[in-house]
Image (cartoon, grey):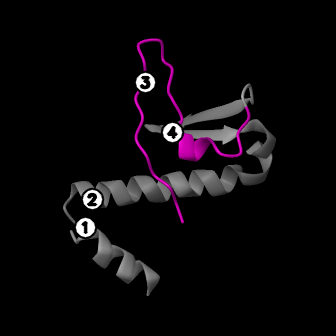
Amino acid sequence: MTDIDVTRMSSKGQIVIPREMRKGLKEGEKLVVIKSGDQLILQPARHFDKKLAEDIEFAKRTEAAYRRYERGEFIEMEFDEFLKRLRK
């Protein structure tokens, strides 16, 4: 399952990676940042070659889904109903 969270950028350009999304990352670990249009992809450098194509595809699908959301094409429902449908 995909995790999504929101963070903010400081006046110095710094961002905080939410705690749950930092699992598996070590302090001082190098991260690769890729900008493609208005998308940013953050990837541990040790995984860069292995997963780049997958990450770019995921970013494209996420952007397309957000555009559908902005056009009002998503269905609103309660959280429990969403989980029920997701499990099907």
Q: Residues within 10 Å of mark 2 (few under 14, many from 20)?
A: few
Vertical placement of residue 57 versus 26, above or below: below
The residue identified by callout 1 is 74
The quadrant where residue 75 appears? bottom left
The residue identified by callout 3 is 9
CB under 8 Å between callouts 3 and 1? no
* Inter-mark Cα distance, 2 to 1: 5 Å
The residue identified by callout 2 is 69
- The stretch in magenta equals 1-26
Judge left or right: residue 34 versus residue 45: left
SS state under label 1: loop
Q: Residue at x 69, y 32 (%)?
A: 31
Q: Which of pointers 3 and 2 lies earlier in the amino acid sequence?
A: 3
Q: Which of pointers 2 and 1 lies earlier in the amino acid sequence?
A: 2
| Residue 18, numbered circle | 4
Residue 11: x and y in percent read: 41, 13
Of labels 3 and 1, the one closer to you: 3
The one of 36 and 31 positioned closer to us in this rendering: 31
CB under 8 Å between callouts 3 and 2? no
Q: Residue at x 75, y 30 (%)?
A: 29
